[in-house]
Image: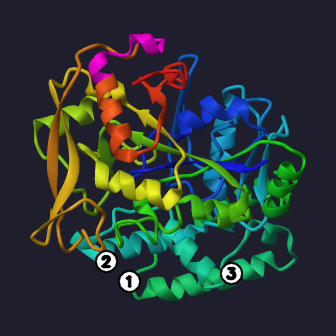
Amino acid sequence: MAVDVLLGLQWGDEGKGKIVDVLSPEYDLIARFQGGPNAGHTLEFDNQKYVLNTIPSGIFNKKTMNLIGNGVVIDPIILKRELDTLKSNGFDPIALKKLVIARKAHLILPTHQLLDAASESKMGDGKIGSTLKGIGPTYMDKTGRNGLRVGDIFLPDFKEKYTRLVNKHKFILSHYGEIPDFSEKEKTFFEAIEFLRTIPQVDSEHFVNNYLKEGKSVLAEGAQGTLLDVDFGSYPFVTSSNTTTAGACTGLGVAPKNIGNVIGIFKAYATRVGGGPFPTELHDETGENLRKIGHEFGATTGRPRRCGWIDIPALKYAIMLNGVTELVMTKADVLSGFKKINVCTHYQYNGEIIDYMPYDICSVPAKPVLKELDGWNEDLTKITSTDQIPAKLKAYMAYLESELDVPIKYLSVGPDRKQTLQLDNLSI
């Protein structure tokens, strides 16, 4: 057996949570491998809507185990809130013994969030567009080798370790100005730590590899998107972790040879939240219509998403980096009613026409070269079989497949888990 990986190919918000939920019956284990509560995975079924920030999106499938891997950073307060909300809605992963946490996952402290806010405020117009959840400062402490890990909460000197790290944070914060009072948040943090002690902890590297030894199926779930990867994204407007397939190896403890299928998810158009370059962004009525029709507002922050046409060079780049073996296209229903749809095929960059993602699109803009395709008018949200897919949508998918050289295996036509079509037998 091998670990399959499911991740986003754009700037996040591609619909990863929904597809993990749809695919979870096929897997014995769903494992989150990076990111933190800056993620917002939205799932809809049975006329209910759920937003998961830290918990893997297989949590609603009662047969599937769920792991929060060592590459994830965990805010105990938000995790407790998530689990309390699930319990109030009739889902109790702890009672069902369907959730475990990696001991090596790092903890987000209240002062990490203060550092995040102070740093972002100091940057002014050049700010990254952080969710202010403390993600970046937590990963900085991780790589700086003085972070706190989930397993530390059982050590007798945990409080001393906490105080030492907080004092470091206070010293840094003092250079930004007055340190905000965080005593109430700190009290809530330690209450959440007590709750965290009730959740089973594992060494994720042994846990996942034992699943594989036993012939069980594993799906690694990513957060954010490939173009936000700290190494290969639109730096510095990126997240603080590796969002690519390589991140699944380090974020769970899996050898590269044990990676199986890589499922890449992309929207039928493109969106981005926060600062940073976005070559195909639309600053007109079309962009606003995409935002309204697609309900493009952040699941975690509520911020309006920037909207634009699909970007082929960026998708090819993401497919190459991740070793994508199959594709999922989401939000095709949002494009219904657009007479014409544009696709970015190349960039005008530094006086040249190129078909790849260059080193720097932040200080040197990449202007999109667009190809116009026919749109479709049909309402896709009610279709239940592949023979109901409009011919012009089939033509759009066929064009994308020919450009990307990877098959589209699933098509999402709405937010509900039932609004997902498997295209294995579809000739497009």
Mark 2: few/some/many CA within 10 Å (<14, 14-19, 20+)? few
Q: Quadrant of residue 314?
A: bottom left
Seen at 80% across and 63% down, the residue is 205
Mark 1: few/some/many CA within 10 Å (<14, 14-19, 20+)? some
Label 3 to label 2, Cα distance in Å? Answer: 25 Å
Q: In the rendered structure, which segment of residues is drawn in magenta?
A: 382-393
Q: Which sits in the foreground, 42 or 209?
A: 209
Mark 1 or 2, nearer chain start: 2
Residue 146 percent coordinates (x, y):
66, 83
Seen at 48% across and 40% down, the residue is 327
| Image side of residue 241 versus residue 330, left or right | right
Number of marks:
3
What amino acid is found at the position of numbered circle 2 in the picture?
Lys
Mark 3: few/some/many CA within 10 Å (<14, 14-19, 20+)? few
1 vs 2, front mark: 2
The residue wearing badge 1 is 176
What amino acid is found at the position of numbered circle 3 in the picture?
Thr
Residue 60 percent coordinates (x, y):
69, 31
| Disc 1 to disc 2: CB gap under 8 Å | yes
Numbered tag placed on residue 163 in the rendering? 3
